[in-house]
Image (spheres, rainbow, N blue to C red):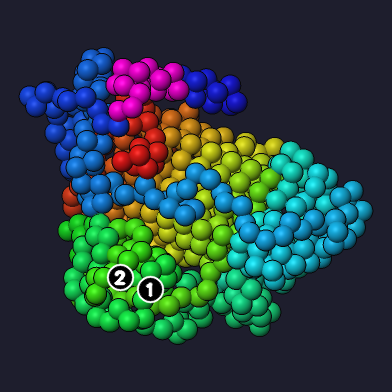
C-alpha cells in the first residue's frame, strides 16, 4: 500500500511539474484555446459527451482541453459559478498562511505540576496552565518534550490560547480514559442506544467555557444540548437587523433595514429560515427540478438543522450597505426572512500545535457505540488552528462541530482504526484541512465496526480538504445536505463507506467539487459524484469503477453536473483548486 501511494504521488507530481512548466510557472489560467477546438462539457448526469471523448484520450491536446475549460469558466464568474464554489478564503483568518503568535504570557505546564515522565495525571496541571494564560487575555502554553499522562479532558475555552508542544514526534499526551468514563454516556437525540461520542467531543476540546458547562450539565441530565451557533432551542440569539433587499449568492454587500447596531469588525450570524414549501433546502440543492418534487417534510433530522446559520464578519458599514468578509453562500430572498443576528460567543484565535495525542489502545467499538476516545474537537470555534498534531488509537480523530474558518494543517490519524478520522458537522463553514494523512490501520477491523473518512454533513458549507494522503477511508458525505464543499489534490485508497440516517435527507447539495483526486484502488464510491450530486464538478479524478456501496440519486431529472479530465488527474488544471483560488 505504501509503495503504491508513493509511486502514484511521485508520478502525479512529475506530471504536474511538466504541465506547470509547459503553461508557465506564473500562469493561473490556461493558454488560449481556439474556439473551434474547445469542447462543450455537457450538463446532464453521466456527462456522456466527455465519456465519448475518452476514446480519444491518446490525443494529448484533447486531454488538455478537457482539463482546463472548467477553470477558465470559473475565473469569469468566481463568486457565483453554478458548479464550483468560491473557497479561496477558507481557513484561519481568511486563509492566512501564518499563525500569529498570541499576545500574552508564555506558561510552562511543568511550572503548574505536569510530569513529563508519565508518572502522574498531568491533565489538572495542563488545564491550570491554560486557565492562567486565558485569564490574562491569552498566551502560549508550552508542553516540553516528554510523555504526559492525562486522565481528563484538556479544555481550551479562552480566546488566543495556544497549547504548544515541542513537535508531534517529541511531545505526547497519553490519554487513559474515554469521554464516557470522564463525563458520562452521551446518548443520541434520535433514540436507541447510540453514543453521541461517535461524532462529538474531544479529549482535547476547544469550546467556549459557557458552552462546555451547558454541554456537560445536559449530558449528566440525559438531555440533548444543541450544538449549533445560537444555543439550546435556538432562543438565545438577538436580531441585529433584517436584510431589507434581496441579495444573490456571491454578493459581498447587503442592504439592511437598520445599521445602527453594526460596526466594522463585528462577528455576526446570517440566518435564513426555510418556508413551508422548503424552498431554502431546494436552493441549497441548486434549485434543480428534482428538488421541487423531493419529499422534504419527513426528513426530521435535516429540518432540525434549519435555519441555516452562517457566521461572518462585518468589514464595512456605509449607510444601509453592509459589506461582509466573504461572499454570500446562498441567495438572501425575502421569503426566508434573512437577518443578521448575535450568536454564541465563540472561541477565537486559539489552537493546538506540535504534539501527539495517544489514546490507550482499546478495540474499536461497534458502529455508533464509541466510548469517546476522541482526538481534537473544535466546537463553536472561529479562526482557530491545529498544526502538526497526530492522534493515535482514537475513535474519532479531528471533529469540527459548528466550527467557522478554522485551519487544520499537518494533521495525522494513525493506530488501530477510527470511526470518523475527520468529522465536519452541525453547520461548520469555511474550514480548511490541508496536508493531512490517514494511516492504514495497524490491526484488522473488528466485526460490526464502520470506517468513514473525511466527513461532512449537517448543512456544512464551503469547507476544503487539500493535499491529503488517505491510506484508508473515503469521501464521507454523511447526508444532512452539505453543499459547496471541495476536496482537491488528494491521493486515496478508497476503502470506506459513507454513512447517514435516512431522516437526514440528501447526500449532497449543489456545488460539491472533487478536483484532482488519485484513487489507487479504482473504487468510485463517494469520489465520482456526477451521477448523484446536483450542480457538482468532478474534475481530474482517476478512472474508477462501481463496487460495494452504490447510491441512488436523491433527485430525479437532470442534475447539471460536470465532469472534466476523467481518468486523467495529470491533465486537470490547476492542480490544486484551493491554492489557485487563493491566488485569483
Answer left or right for 470 relative to 112. Answer: left
Q: Would you place residue 60 above or below residue 239 in this image?
A: above
Residue located farthest toward the right when viewing the structure as drawn: 119
Where residue 311 sits: x, y (%)? 41, 66
**Which residue is the site of mark 2?**
317
Q: Which label sits on residue 263?
A: 1
Tell me the SS state at disc 2.
strand
Residue 581 drawn in magenta: no
| Residue closer to the observer: 6 or 212 | 212
Residue located farthest toward the left when viewing the structure as drawn: 36
Where residue 18 sits: x, y (%)? 37, 17
Separation of residues labelled 1 and 2 (CA atoms): 7 Å
Where residue 261 sits: x, y (%)? 36, 81
The crowding category of the residue bearing disc 2, from other C-alpha atoms within 10 Å (few below 14, some 14 to 19, many at least 20), is many
At horizontal 62% and vertical 37% (from top left) the residue drawn is 439
Cβ–Cβ under 8 Å for marks 1 and 2: yes
Mark with earlier residue (1, 2) = 1
Region of the chain picked out in magenta, as a range: 12-27
Amino acid at each position: 500500500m505504501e509503495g503504491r501511494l508513493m509511486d502514484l504521488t511521485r508520478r502525479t507530481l512529475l506530471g504536474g511539474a511538466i504541465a506547470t512548466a509547459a503553461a508557465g510557472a506564473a500562469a493561473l489560467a490556461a493558454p488560449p484555446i481556439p474556439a473551434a477546438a474547445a469542447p462543450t462539457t455537457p450538463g446532464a448526469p453521466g456527462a456522456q459527451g466527455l465519456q465519448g471523448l475518452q476514446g480519444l484520450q491518446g490525443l494529448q491536446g484533447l486531454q488538455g482541453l478537457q482539463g482546463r475549460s472548467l477553470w477558465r469558466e470559473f475565473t469569469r464568474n468566481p463568486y457565483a459559478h453554478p458548479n464550483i464554489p468560491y473557497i479561496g478564503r477558507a481557513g484561519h483568518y481568511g486563509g492566512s498562511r501564518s499563525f500569529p503568535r498570541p499576545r500574552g504570557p508564555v506558561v510552562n505546564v511543568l511550572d503548574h505540576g505536569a510530569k513529563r515522565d508519565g508518572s502522574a495525571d498531568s491533565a489538572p496541571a495542563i488545564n491550570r496552565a491554560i486557565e492562567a494564560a486565558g485569564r490574562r487575555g491569552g498566551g502560549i502554553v508550552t508542553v516540553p518534550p516528554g510523555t504526559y499522562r492525562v486522565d481528563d479532558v484538556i479544555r481550551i475555552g479562552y480566546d488566543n490560547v495556544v497549547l504548544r508542544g515541542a513537535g508531534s514526534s517529541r511531545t505526547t499526551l497519553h490519554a487513559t480514559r474515554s469521554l464516557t468514563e470522564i463525563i458520562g454516556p452521551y446518548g443520541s437525540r434520535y433514540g436507541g442506544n447510540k453514543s453521541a461520542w461517535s461524532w462529538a467531543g474531544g479529549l482535547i476540546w476547544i469550546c467556549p467555557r459557557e458552552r462546555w458547562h451547558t454541554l456537560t450539565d445536559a449530558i449528566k441530565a440525559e438531555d440533548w444540548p444543541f450544538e449549533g451557533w445560537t444555543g439550546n432551542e435556538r432562543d438565545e440569539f438577538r436580531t441585529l437587523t433584517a436584510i431589507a433587499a434581496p441579495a444573490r449568492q456571491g454578493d459581498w454587500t447587503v442592504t439592511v433595514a437598520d445599521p445602527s447596531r453594526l460596526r466594522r469588525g463585528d462577528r455576526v450570524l446570517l440566518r435564513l429560515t426555510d418556508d413551508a414549501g422548503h424552498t431554502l433546502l431546494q436552493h441549497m440543492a441548486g434549485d434543480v427540478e428534482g428538488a421541487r418534487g423531493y419529499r422534504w417534510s419527513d426528513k426530521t433530522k435535516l429540518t432540525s438543522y434549519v435555519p441555516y446559520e452562517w457566521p461572518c464578519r462585518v468589514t464595512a458599514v456605509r449607510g444601509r450597505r453592509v459589506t461582509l468578509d466573504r461572499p454570500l453562500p446562498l441567495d438572501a430572498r425575502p421569503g426566508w426572512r434573512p437577518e443578521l443576528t448575535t450568536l454564541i460567543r465563540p472561541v477565537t484565535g486559539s489552537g493546538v500545535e506540535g504534539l501527539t495525542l495517544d489514546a490507550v489502545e482499546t478495540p474499536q467499538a461497534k458502529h455508533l457505540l464509541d466510548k469517546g476516545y476522541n482526538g481534537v474537537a473544535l466546537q463553536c470555534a472561529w479562526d482557530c488552528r491545529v498544526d502538526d498534531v497526530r492522534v493515535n488509537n482514537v475513535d474519532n480523530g479531528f471533529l469540527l462541530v459548528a466550527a467557522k474558518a478554522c485551519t487544520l494543517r499537518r494533521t495525522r490519524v494513525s493506530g488501530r482504526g477510527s470511526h470518523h478520522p475527520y468529522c465536519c458537522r452541525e453547520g461548520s463553514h469555511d474550514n480548511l484541512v490541508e496536508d493531512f494523512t490517514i494511516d492504514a490501520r495497524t490491526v484488522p477491523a473488528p466485526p460490526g465496526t464502520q470506517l468513514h473518512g473525511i466527513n461532512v454533513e449537517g448543512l456544512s458549507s464551503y469547507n476544503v480538504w487539500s493535499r491529503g494522503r488517505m491510506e484508508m477511508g473515503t469521501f464521507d458525505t454523511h447526508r444532512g445536505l452539505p453543499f459547496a464543499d471541495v476536496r482537491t489534490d488528494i491521493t486515496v485508497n478508497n476503502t470506506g463507506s459513507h454513512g447517514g440516517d435516512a431522516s437526514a435527507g440528501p447526500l449532497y447539495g449543489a456545488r460539491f467539487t472533487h478536483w484532482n483526486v488519485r484513487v489507487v484502488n479504482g473504487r468510485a464510491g463517494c469520489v465520482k459524484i456526477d451521477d448523484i450530486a446536483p450542480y457538482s464538478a468532478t474534475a481530474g479524478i482517476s478512472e474508477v469503477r462501481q463496487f460495494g456501496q452504490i447510491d441512488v440519486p436523491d433527485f430525479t431529472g437532470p442534475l447539471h453536473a460536470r465532469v472534466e479530465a476523467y481518468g486523467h488527474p495529470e491533465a486537470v488544471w490547476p492542480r490544486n483548486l484551493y491554492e489557485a483560488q487563493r491566488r485569483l
